[in-house]
């Protein structure tokens, strides 16, 4: 694969018996019992340390005050006994931590960092400021009664350093929107959070990269608005290729409204770059894991997506 000017840091691989630190940098856990999250990871063969933010609430929608959540994040990276850092859920709040984080702590203590949705704010920052490969994959609450596809995808990515082909779950077809082949570092995540980064110090850089986008629970016109914002910001112009993931529960207001597929196909035809849709990563279940910051080979014509860790 093509060489990059910046060598990304591939964190140490996770093995059974290692210790996972579970933090809550965004919203507080409501969907499942916190003890069940801990037990699930222990049953998989790992030691677990649950941080205070997992048990805290602030404003009704945050897992404790910003300072607590930022401290837990930094402490988990600095603790030599912690081998990986898992986020317990998304929601809202991760972007509030960006100005509180000492990014040297993250860069000097590279570890597996796993989460999605609101965690996109941290993925973008860690990729760009710390040169760290991070993992867009299931949050901690999803480890309770986790399906085999999701489990295999996440642990293959964080436990091995070989080339990995992304394969959708059975019955879910990857759709080609524009033919072609490209290679580049894969970046992105949740559409709303990518948009939130624009105009800030933490703005996503898509230059010569492959842009991955997913979204959930938005009206289609809001998806249109955010996609158009990325268009006007030059993010599609800059990138080499586009991977549209899952757009869970993104719904029309009226029957005559365009569908998500119409909006993203318009982008594909406008930019004429290798583009695929329905890669099963995002808020879907099962969910595939993507190593953000790793090199990606995209063959949109033959619907092949491959991640390569050898240049890290």
Image: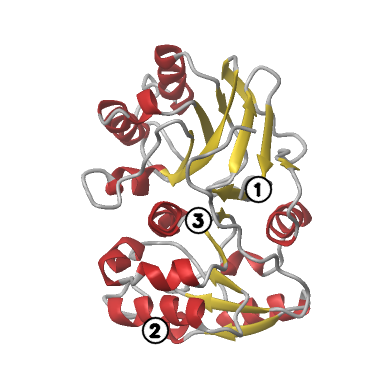
Residue 65, percent across and down? 29, 80
Q: Residues within 10 Å of mark 3 (few under 14, many from 20)?
A: many
- The answer to whether the residue labelled 3 contacts the one labelled 1, judged by CB atoms less than 8 Å apart, is no
User: Sequence order check: which comes first, mark 1 or mark 2?
Assistant: 2
Residue 36, percent across and down? 64, 79
Please determine whether, in this image, residue 19 is positioned above or below residue 168.
below
Residue 87, percent across and down? 51, 68
Please determine whether, in this image, residue 288 is positioned above or below residue 104.
above
Is label 1 in a helix, a strand or a loop? loop
Q: Which of labels 3 and 2 is toward the front?
A: 3
**Residue at the (45%, 85%) spot, across then down:** 55
Q: CA distance from mark 3 to mark 1?
A: 11 Å
**Which residue is under mark 3?**
116
Q: CA distance from mark 3 to mark 2?
A: 20 Å
Q: Which mark is residue 56?
A: 2
**Residue at the (63%, 75%) spot, across then down:** 83
**Which residue is under mark 1?**
288
User: Sequence order check: which comes first, mark 3 or mark 1?
Assistant: 3
**Residue at the (54%, 67%) spot, across then down:** 110
Is label 3 in a helix, a strand or a loop? loop
Q: Is 298 or 152 nearer to us in this picture? A: 298
């Amino acid at each position: 694969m093509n060489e990059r000017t910046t060598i990304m840091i591939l964190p140490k691989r996770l093995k059974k018996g290692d210790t996972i630190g579970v933090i809550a940098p965004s919203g507080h856990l409501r969907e499942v019992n916190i003890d069940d999250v801990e037990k699930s990871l222990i049953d998989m063969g790992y030691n677990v340390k649950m941080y205070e933010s997992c048990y805290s609430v602030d404003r009704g929608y945050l897992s404790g005050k910003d300072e607590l959540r930022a401290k837990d994040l930094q402490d988990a990276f600095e603790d030599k006994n912690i081998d990986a850092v898992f986020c317990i859920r998304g929601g809202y709040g991760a972007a509030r931590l960006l100005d509180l984080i000492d990014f040297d702590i993250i860069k000097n203590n590279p570890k597996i960092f796993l989460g999605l949705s609101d965690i996109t704010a941290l993925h973008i920052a860690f990729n760009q400021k710390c040169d760290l490969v991070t993992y867009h994959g299931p949050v901690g609450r999803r480890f309770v009664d986790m399906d085999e596809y999701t489990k295999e995808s996440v642990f293959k990515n964080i436990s091995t350093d070989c080339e990995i082909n992304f394969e959708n779950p059975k019955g879910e077809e990857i759709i080609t929107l524009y033919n072609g082949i490209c290679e580049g570092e894969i970046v992105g995540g949740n559409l709303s959070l990518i948009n939130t980064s624009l105009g800030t110090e933490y703005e996503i850089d898509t230059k010569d990269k492959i842009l991955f986008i997913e979204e959930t629970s938005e009206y289609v016109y809001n998806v249109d608005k955010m996609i158009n914002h990325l268009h006007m910001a030059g993010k599609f112009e800059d990138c080499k290729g586009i991977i549209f993931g899952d757009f869970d529960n993104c719904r029309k207001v009226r029957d005559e409204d365009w569908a998500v597929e119409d909006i993203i196909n318009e982008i594909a035809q406008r930019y004429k770059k290798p583009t695929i849709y329905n890669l099963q990563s995002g808020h879907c279940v099962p969910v595939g894991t993507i190593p953000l910051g790793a090199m990606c080979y995209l063959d949109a014509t033959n619907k092949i997506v491959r991640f390569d860790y050898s240049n890290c």
